[in-house]
Image (cartoon, grey):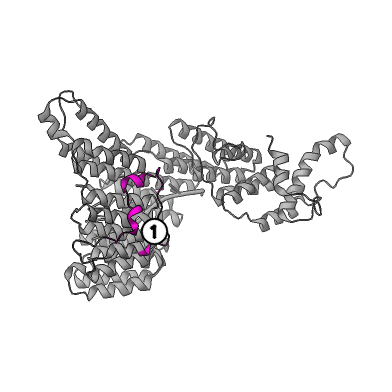
Amino acid sequence: MLKSGYLPHVKAWSSVVSKLASLGDDSPMEAIKIFSAVTKRVRRFSDPAVVKLSKPDTAAYNAVLNACANIGDKNRFLELFDEMNEFDCEPDVLTYNVMIKLCARADRKDLLVFVLERIVEKGIPLCMSTFQSLVAAYVGFGDLVTAEKVVQAMREGRRDLCKILREANEEKPCLSDTDVFEKLLPNSVSSRDNEPLELSRVFEPNSRMYTTLMKGYMNAGRVTDMVRMLEAMRHLGDSESHPDHVTYTTVITAFVKQGSMDRAREVLAEMARIGVPANRVTYNVLIKGYCQQLQIDKAEELIKEMFDTGIEPDVVSYNTIIDGCILVDDSAGALSYFNEMRARGIAPTKVSYTTLMKAFASSGQTKLANKVFDEMLKDPRVKVDLVAWNMLVDVYSKLGKVEEAKSVIERMKENGIYPNVATYGSLANGIALARKPGEALLLWNEIRQRCGMGTGEESNPSSGLPPLEPDEGLLDTLADICVRAAFFKKALEIVACMEQHGIPPNKTKFTRIYVEMHSRMFTSKHASQARQDRRKERKRAAEAFKFWLGLPNSYYGSEWRLDSVIDEEYGSE
DNA sequence: TTAGGGTTAG
């Protein structure tokens, strides 16, 4: 990659790092790798002139720290943050802005104020982005009250924002010695009894910040507050705070989410009237809205309107309308938009391929779906990801083709991609459809191990698969299959797993299945002794399951506890 | 180089 005796200028390589930092997939990981590779080379370099031009600067560190924040890797963040000294890089305000994002990703709302205080304490000049980052973080936490407090304080020109934010922390923050944040924000918590620092200067909120707050209202379903805010912004004195195309697009998004397409269109008209032009994103939001309403003709009209207005539809516009065609069972339409897109020279993304696969999956055309998948594999611009593999699993599962689905899962594992809860969910549905309860047992064994259940150990090193957080759909499907097949021992394991993960099992449904299918089980008096013995264990499991359901059972009135029987019956496996 | 808006997943 890099010739020996040569090192790229820091501006050159750090711009690559910064681009990769915020792209999707594993690109932040790539960014970190490139950063580490270059700094490693710089350390080995002797020519001071070259080193001076190539060594990382604060901007380069900010780029790689941003990558760490984006993937929530706080340990790596700390490591790189500490390393800044080595190259005489001082953290600047952007470094701390990225740290705000790290706190947000690491679910440490309590520490946001200390990042702000650290900036003030170190005498680093604040910038608007710090406040923008803070408001975005509080909005991300769903804490609109605090987000509003920040904006309000800024409007009032207050300098005691740190005090306000400290008071907004419901609980006392705590940092242990082992916490990386204790090292990133030294003495922050111990000094919290001191007077909070005052800001050196104040900033006015701008439309960007108001729009962030609006997004919070949207996420909370508070559309009325959004409209009120839009109205207020229009009447604000400074032009910096007036609603812009992003503000309007956010309002349109909220209406679209509500299904209020008429109101969304009114906003579009309003934008034209006041001379804030809609852009491609605005149109894409509206197209999505019509597709959700199954009004594909309206969505198509908007595509035409885009061309007329000189806004070329992009890959997102096409992906959206392709998905819309699927919603109305028009896989031919989906394909023709896919082809039109390519004819216009717009490169399909993995979303395009995956969506097209979905079209063929929903029309039962496995061969075509497979062909699309192969094309995606061949396309060098696209990296096949977990979602794409899951779609292929789903293609077969939807038709109950369990063997094929399983072999896709094997292939994905060979390609280094681990099945997730969606993969297993598809397969479980396929198993249910194919009525192959034996397969459900095999699947449950794999899932159980990844949930840290069964063996009593936290994880199992033998499978080599990472831990899995199961969800309701998956476990319910598996439990359903097991109850129908009278695999009560396994059914009890699964419902125990559900309870362990805070998922309430649907007892009513399982009771109904039990009563309809198995209430007459074990009632035959004519079986041989040998056969009755063989049944004994299954019968015990059935009794335990009935006990769990609350149906009359042989344990009633005894000192029996569910846990102890599960241990007794299944603990020794 | 951070921070506002859109698309894919059982």
Q: Which of the 4 quarters of the picture holds residue A171?
A: bottom left
Q: Which of the 4 quarters of the picture holds residue B3?
A: bottom left
- Comparing A51 with A350, the one in front is A51
Q: Position of residue A177 (x, y in %)?
A: 39, 44
Q: Is residue A301 left or right of residue A542?
A: left
Residue A220 lies in the magenta stretch: no
Please give the range of residues in magenta: A167-196
The residue positioned farthest toward the front in the image shown: A194
- Main SS of residues in magenta: loop
Q: How many marks?
A: 1
Q: Is residue A81 above or below residue A243?
A: above
Q: Answer few, some or many: residues within 10 Å of disc 1's Cα (few below 14, many 20 plus, some between 14 and 19).
A: some
Q: Position of residue A408 (x, y in %)?
A: 49, 35
Q: Is residue A556 above or below residue A298?
A: above
Q: Residue visible at 54% across and 36% down? A: A459
Q: Quadrant of the C terminus of chain A?
A: top right
Residue A189 lies in the magenta stretch: yes
The residue positioned farthest toward the left in the image shown: A49
Q: Is residue A265 above or below residue A2?
A: below
Q: Position of residue B5 (x, y in %)?
A: 31, 59
- Comparing A165 with A205, the one in front is A165
Q: Which of the chains bears the disc numbered 1?
A: A
Q: Residue visible at 27% across and 33% down? A: A36
- Whether residue A246 is visible here, answered yes or no, is no
Q: Position of residue A228 (x, y in %)?
A: 32, 75
- Whether residue A514 is visible here, answered yes or no, is yes
Q: Mark 1 sits on what residue?
A: A141
Looking at the rendered structure, the kind of residue marked 1 is Phe
- Comparing A403 with A173, the one in front is A173
Q: Quadrant of the N terminus of chain A?
A: top left
- Comparing A259 with A523, the one in front is A523
